[in-house]
Structure formats: structure tokens, C-alpha cells
Image (tube, helix red, strand yellow):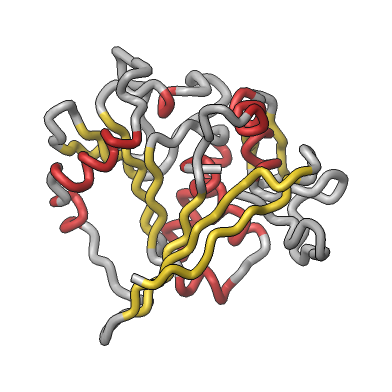
Amino acid sequence: MEFLGFKNYWNDFLQSAETQVVMFRDKGVDHDTIVVCFRGTQKFNTEDWCSDVDLSWFEFPHFGKIHSGFSKALGMQSGAGWAKQVVSDSTHGPRRAPLGGALAAIFPAILFYHDEQMLLERMEGVYTFDQPRVGDNEFGDYMAKNLRKHGVHFFRYVYCNDMVPRVPFDGVFKHFGTCVYYNSKYQPYLFGMRILGLLNTGIPAHRAQNYVNSTRLGSLRHLLFHHFQHK
């Protein structure tokens, strides 16, 4: 695995580089895979928490409603929306920004929105961990249709009674994608595109170690039902 870099990206609404991305490359005889990871909320970063708790939304025609705080963190420009071409400067670098599972979930939508064929032809899958809800029903339908169209797999991992995947509470915001739920014994269960929030939510389950253990100690047999072919 080759380390490609760690970048800080600009949030135009906060006027600071508050979003981080790390990239790796795994190259072999029969594949060449690049992994893009969006860093999640940092415990003592007030700007991250401001993005999380902003429960307003932006609405786009034929696109649906999307969580406002996450949209801003993912590079939305004040007064310009998601610009296709973003001008960089020597002070702040490229003005594109991503924030954890929510940003990974919305990122493909930006590629669909701008019809980024080169990237979409090469994108194999999206994997989110403890991802909150990011959009409404219309947005979920938009994502499901385009994920199928471009052959992109979407797995949303949820550990036990972690409360974060259950917020913002079921109302305007809805989930999409295949939910891979791990119980406290790291046994996986698959759920379909839409599922109501599971009960008995809690904060203690919201720990990175629980998700590391789920993928390392739990079964990955759910992946056997999905044929992955390198593009």
C-alpha cells in the first residue's frame, strides 16, 4: 500500500481549511486501486461540530435536499454552489473540502451532478462507517438510480447501537445504500436501501475501535454476494 498524501481542504463558509483527506494506492498485477478517505469529526474541533449540528438543508432541482453542514464541508462555494472548476490559490490550496462518512456518502453525488465520467468509470465502491443521514427521500432515489447506472457499490456500516447513524432523526433525512449492521458479537446482517432507525441507540458504541473490530473480527461474507470487478 502506497501513501499518496494527506491534505487539508478549504471550507468557503468557515473561511478556513477544516477538512482533511488521506489517499492510498494499492497496485498489483491485476489491479490498481486508489482509496480516498475523508476524516471524521475531531472531538475538540468546534468547526467540525458546527458542520455536524447544522440541521438545515440545501435543495436542488431533480436532486433533493442535502444536509447543509456536510454540503459546506464538501466544498460548496458561497454564492456559487458546487462549482465544476475550482480555482486554487497559494494560501489555501484547492477550495474543495470533504468530513467522514457523511462526506463519503455525498461525494459521488457531486460526480453525478457534474457528469464526471472519467472518475465514475473508475469508481468501484463507497464504504461509510457510522454515517449519519445526509439527505431526503428524493436525494436517496437520485443516489440509488445513479449508483446502479454507474455500477458503483455502496455499503453503509453500522455497529450495534451506535446513535450517529440514527441522526438526524428520521423525518426530512433518510438513508440510502446497503446497510451492513454488526451486532455486539461482530455478526453482520444486511438490510436494503431504506430502513428505519434501529432502537436502543447509544453513545458508547460510537467508537472507532468497534468499527475496526467489525471489519477485522466480523464476517465479510456479505461481500461475496456482490461481484467486484476492477474497472
Q: Is residue 136 above or below residue 53?
A: below
| Image quarter in which the C terminus is found | bottom left
| Image quarter in which the N terminus is found | bottom left
Which residue is painted at 56% across and 27% down in the image? 44
Residue 40 in percent (x, y) is at: 50, 40
> Which of 69/65 is in front?
69
Image position of 77 (left or right of 145)? right
Which residue is painted at 21% across and 40% down in the image? 214
Query: In which quarter of the view is residue 158 placed?
Result: top left
Q: Is residue 4 above or below residue 214?
A: below
How many marks can you see?
A: 0
Query: In which quarter of the view is residue 117 placed?
Result: bottom right
Which residue is painted at 54% across and 71% down in the image? 119
Residue 131 in percent (x, y) is at: 44, 36
Image position of 121 (left or right of 195)? right
Image position of 176 (left or right of 118)? left
Q: Is residue 169 above or below residue 64?
A: above
Q: Residue furthest top?
A: 200
Query: In which quarter of the view is residue 71 placed?
Result: top right
Which residue is painted at 78% across and 63% down in the image? 86
Residue 121 in percent (x, y) is at: 48, 74
Residue 96 in percent (x, y) is at: 69, 56
> Which of 55/6 is in front?
6
Q: Residue furthest right?
A: 79
